[in-house]
Amino acid sequence: MGDFLNQDAIDDLISQIGDDSGGGGSSLGGGDDFGLGDLGDLGVDMPAAPSGGGRAASPVVPADTDKDVRPYDFARASKFSKDQIRTIQMIHETFARLFASTLAAKIRALTKIKVVSVEEVTYEDFINTVSNPSIISIFSMPPMEGNAVLDISPQIGFPVMDRLLGGAGEEDEEARELTDIEVNIMESVLHDALGFIKEAWANVIDINPKLELLESNPYFVQVVPPSEMIVLVNLEAEVGEKTGRMNLAIPYVMLETVLPKLSIQQWFSTYRRTVSPDTPLKVEERLLKTAVQFTVQLGRTNISLKDFLNLGEGDIIQVNSKVSDELPIFVGDRIKFKGRPGVVGKRIAIQTTSVVKDVEEV
């Protein structure tokens, strides 16, 4: 493409075409196959049409390269539409919200997880961005074929494990491989994450994610060929004051069978508005693990500030309730029950006698 024909070469070429057609130069103007107008459409500067009545040359219209020509890499052909990418983003926004709420309750720290971007890249590009060592889980999602990868950076993985072990959520100074105890702890976190992946994808397909392997070296993780296209979901996680990334890589071969369902129209048309039979059980299970404040009010009295400041161990305070009276029992700041005080073994106890239906605030 570096050399261009000059005007003399173009004229010689046109003359040769005219001689082959048997009509000389005058036939160029009227021929349908080799007319001046056809060559003019190619953007070649044409000489004026012959005066013998030939067809006039079409005006040259330069192409708008910025608008009409777009680069395309055939080695990395796009396999997902924008609509499908948007649907995948919505699915994992649901996953991020569910996982963040459960993880916050589990480690007792403010946790935020959000989807930063969803992009289509090759598996090689993804694996080259993973730090070594890292916390890499390989999992399957039957009935979809193949394996996906969830990468959790050490900057967020170690603080989570430290919180679960009773620490303050500190990060190790140097990245390292997980110990056997840390592997077991991280597997429990990943099982929770896979459960929420299943819940997030339930509107598209019923899957049963299963953790296959936990690896620290990204170069040992080869679930698809390096040139295979994947959907890369980039997530950002905040645990307390620590911030790190999470990457979810799903190969095209896994999503190929469900691509027709990955559309906004399909998403909203099949949205499950009815409550799943498992939902009440899940809510009950979470509520049963919730810690609440439980107090019993033994009585009330009024004393002077002087007497209050002089109170010491062993002093006796006379209250307005009797031994035979039922005492109010509070859950949080609301009275829920009434009961009588007593002793069980060597412990002071309360026996509930009735349920307060009309809830009264303190």
Image (cartoon, rainbow, N blue to C red):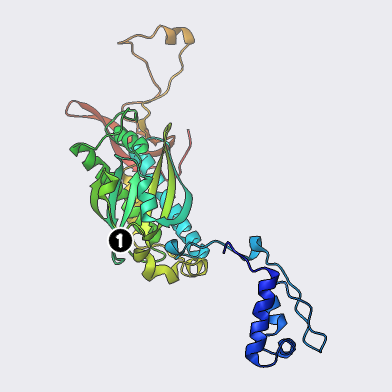
Q: Quadrant of residue 333?
A: top left
Taking the spot 24% from the left edge, 37% from the top edge, the residue there is: 177
Q: Is residue 291 visible?
A: no
Q: Can you give x and y, in whole percent of width and height, for residue 162 in the image? A: 30, 32
- Choose between 81 and 9: the one closer to the eye: 9
Q: Can you give x and y, in whole percent of width and height, for residue 23 in the image? A: 69, 92
Residue found at the very far right of the displayed protein: 51
* Position above or below: 14 against 158: below
Taking the spot 75% from the left edge, 89% from the top edge, the residue there is: 26
Q: Quadrant of the N terminus?
A: bottom right
Taking the spot 43% from the left edge, 61% from the top edge, the residue there is: 76
Q: How many marks?
A: 1
- Choose between 100 and 314: the one closer to the eye: 100
Taking the spot 24% from the left edge, 47% from the top edge, the residue there is: 214
Q: Residues within 10 Å of mark 1 (few under 14, many from 20)?
A: some
Q: Quadrant of residue 216?
A: top left
Apparent side of residue 53 relative to residue 113 in the rendered image (left or right): right
- Choose between 240 and 304: the one closer to the eye: 240
